[in-house]
Image (tube, rainbow, N blue to C red):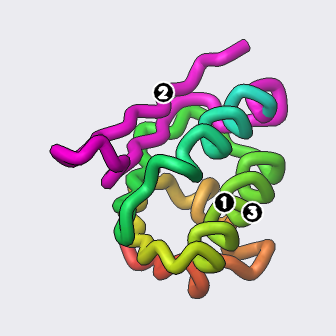
Amino acid sequence: MENFIFHKTQDEQGRIVSIKISGLLILENSQELKKEFLGLIDSLGNRLKINISNVTDIDLSFVQLFMAFVRQMNIAHVACQFEWKLDEDQKTLFENVGLSNELIMNN
């Protein structure tokens, strides 16, 4: 399906310092999203800014993939900064699985 955007920004050394994810973050795109997340692992520095905005739809499959990625970032000692622009229903999905506080979802 692949109706999502996964934009990466690199620093002068080629390390990925930020990602912006938007579009359809749903089961039908989960394999491609997983490939995108896995492709980042070896190219990161010590910090990563993650922006999730302009989300058309989101489901539990994305939440699971995203949390697995965040756990790997913690293991690799990569400091993550989150920037969210989600509607109330999308925020509720994270809240219902108990993750809004863990991901510092204030905006």
Percent coordinates x, y for residue 14 in the rendering: 29, 42
Where is 106 relative to 43, above or below? below
Disc 3 + disc 1, Cβ < 8 Å: yes
Q: Is residue 100 visible?
A: no
Residue type pointed to by label 3:
Ala
Would you name the residue on which mark 3 appears?
68
Image mark for residue 79:
none
Give the x, y percent position of residue 52: 45, 50
Name which quarter of the figure residue 106 lies in. Answer: bottom left
Rate crowding at label 1 as few (under 14), some (14 to 19) or many (20 or more) other CA atoms within 10 Å.
Answer: some
Disc 2 to disc 1, C-alpha distance: 17 Å
- Report which residue position mark 2 lands on: 5
> Is the residue under label 2 in contact with that under label 3 (CB below 8 Å)?
no
Most extreme residue toward the top is 1
Q: Is residue 23 above or below residue 39?
A: above
Q: Is residue 93 above or below residue 100?
A: above
User: Could you tell me which secondary element the residue under label 2 belongs to?
Assistant: strand
Residue 87 is situated, as x and y percent measured from the top left of the image, at 50, 53
Callout 3 environment at 10 Å: few (<14), some (14 to 19), or many (20+)? some
Q: Which residue bears the numbered disc 1?
A: 69
User: Which numbered disc flags the more N-terminal residue, 3 or 2?
Assistant: 2
Q: Residue at x 56, y 33 (%)?
A: 56
Q: Residue at x 83, y 34 (%)?
A: 27
Q: Quick one: label 2, few (<14), some, or many (20+) residues within 10 Å?
A: some
